[in-house]
Amino acid sequence: MADTVDAYIGKFSKEVQLLLQQLRKWIQEEAPEATEEISYGMPAYKLKGPLVYFGAAKKHIGLYPTSSGIVAFQSRFEACGLKYSKGAVQLPMDRELPEQLIRDIVRQRKKTLEEK
């Protein structure tokens, strides 16, 4: 199991690494004060609690913004044709990552945590 985010990302093909690095960059730009670690075997960002997690699967990247992050963006997930569940959204690897949506999710989660 990887013990750093760099090691986690390094396990994947170059194409997947690029997607994961892009996602990581956007999260860090939106929440530079968040700490980065490995939790539940995947990259995790914390700021007064869990901000977001992400992980690569065979055909998608899972973004885990907790249940509040999912509820707040359900209509946008549907509009983008993204599969989602109670705590995760699937970002297909054969499509461009939805940068604005990802940034908005991180901002919303950050605001929610800062208000606690």
Image (tube, helix red, strand yellow):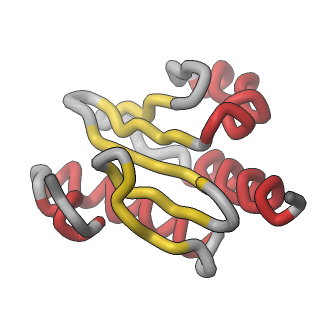
Q: Nearer the viewer, residue 97 or 64?
A: 64
Left-right relation of 95 to 73: left
User: What percent of the width, then of the height, locates residue 15?
Assistant: 18, 52
Identify the image quadrant of the C terminus.
Answer: bottom right
In the image, what residue occupies the spot 32% across and 32% down?
A: 60
Q: Nearer the viewer, residue 82 or 28?
A: 28
User: What percent of the width, then of the height, locates residue 107?
Assistant: 73, 59
User: What percent of the width, then of the height, locates residue 47?
Assistant: 64, 67
Q: Nearer the viewer, residue 27 or 82?
A: 27
Q: Residue pushed farthest bottom?
A: 33
Left-right relation of 19 to 104: left
Is 30 situated above or below 107?
below
In the image, what residue occupies the spot 17% across and 66% down?
A: 7
In the image, what residue occupies the spot 65% across and 19% down?
A: 78
Left-right relation of 12 to 25: left
In the image, what residue occupies the spot 64% across and 69% down?
A: 30
Q: Residue pushed farthest right?
A: 115
User: What percent of the width, then of the height, locates residue 115?
Assistant: 89, 60
Labels in figure, total: 0
Left-right relation of 9 to 61: left
Is 84 situated above or below 2?
above
Residue 22: image quadrant is bottom left
